[in-house]
Structures are given as structure tokens and as C-alpha cells.
Image (cartoon, rainbow, N blue to C red):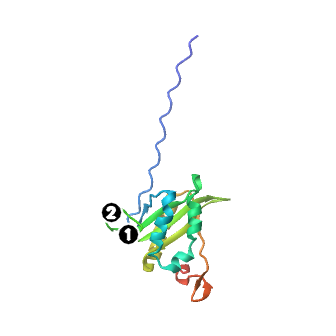
Amino acid sequence: APHPPPAPMAPPRPRPLAPAEPADAAFQLRPVGASVADIGGIFERYVARVDARIAKSMESAEVLMQAAQEDGSEATEWFWLVRSGKATAPTTAETADGLCVFRVKRMSTTIGQLLHLSVTDFSWVEEAIDSVKERMFSWLPIRSIRATLWYCEFDGEFQLFKDLEAC
């Protein structure tokens, strides 16, 4: 006896749209778009423009380069921060207003690990934090964001950069 024809397959579920960039965010996040081999030099050119107190308070360049080697679900994501409303020309290490590097970490709960966040003008740091938090929570399947602030030597003493810690 002939077999009945197979039942038609259900249409595929539509993929959810990626969240739109918040219209009122102070910063847009633009992918750095560099190879792992090039990211070190790009980072060094950018961080030379940043207040050393901010740069030293986040993960070191060495840690960031090691993290950049990882791939898969816990790979780092590198984004330039660009003031909203700024020209749409390509963003480079010499023109970016800031940089953030984060990744998803799966532990007992899934978190966003913020490895680096800096801006070229410290007066923008709170707006940068808000923009990055909004982007991470809307794009990543995370419950919280964790960042480490390191003690650094300032004026001959090891201490936290209090202005950054206050944000």
C-alpha cells in the first residue's frame, strides 16, 4: 500500500528583530570591526587619548588581548562609543569618543562582564555608562552586569579612582 504524503511542515517562526538603538541614548555603539591580530594596536592608539586614571582602573591591555582570543558564546564584543548626532563617518581609534568591551559569562546565572569602558572626556562617563547598560540589557540574555575597578597608583598611593567609582 502506498504511504500517504508527508504532512506539510509548519512555516518557520519569524526571528525576533534586534532591538533598535535607543533614540535618546547619549552614545551610539559601533562595532570596532578589527581582527584579533589588529585589535592590540588599535587599542593602544585609542587608549593614548584617554585619561590614564580611567584606563588603569579597568582591565589591563594584556587581559583584554587574552580575552580577544576567545571565541564562541563568551567571545568579547568591542564597540566604539560615538556621541549621538555626531557625523556618521567611519569611527577609528583617533576619532572615537569612547570604547567598551564586554562579554557574556555563563555561571550560576548569565551575566554581562564589562571588561573596559572609557571615554575621551571624563564629563561624559555617566552618559556612557547609561548607554552601555541600556545596550547590554536590551541585546544580551543577561540578568546583571559586573565590572571590576582596579586600585591604581595615584599620587604615590594605591587607591580607586574615586570619580569613576562614584558613577
Task: Looking at this view, name the residue that lies furthest to the right.
Answer: 108
The residue beneath circle 1 is 95
Q: Residue at x 55, y 69 (%)?
A: 61
Q: For mark 2, does the 10 Å Cα neighbourhood hold few (<14), some (14 to 19), or many (20 or more) residues?
A: few
Residue 138 visible, this angle: no
Instruction: Locate the N terminus and report the quarter of the image it occupies.
Output: top right
In the picture, measured across the screen, residue 81 lies left or right of residue 87, that is right
For the residue labelled by badge 2, is the local secondary structure a helix, a strand or a loop? loop
The residue beneath circle 2 is 89
Mark closest to the chain's N terminus, 2 or 1? 2
Q: Amino acid at mark 2?
A: Ala
Q: Amino acid at mark 1?
A: Thr
- How far across and down, in percent of the image, does residue 96 sit? 40, 69
State if disc 1 and disc 2 touch (CB < 8 Å).
yes
Specify the quadrant of the image occupied by residue 66.
bottom right
Residue 20 visible, this angle: yes
Q: CA distance from mark 2 to mark 1?
A: 9 Å
- How far across and down, in percent of the image, does residue 83 sit? 38, 70
Which one is nearer the viewer's eye here, 81 or 156?
156
In the picture, measured across the screen, residue 157 lies left or right of residue 13, that is right
For the residue labelled by badge 1, is the local secondary structure a helix, a strand or a loop? loop
Which one is nearer the viewer's eye here, 150 or 92?
92
- How far across and down, in percent of the image, does residue 154 sit? 57, 86
Q: Residue at x 44, y 56 (%)?
A: 19
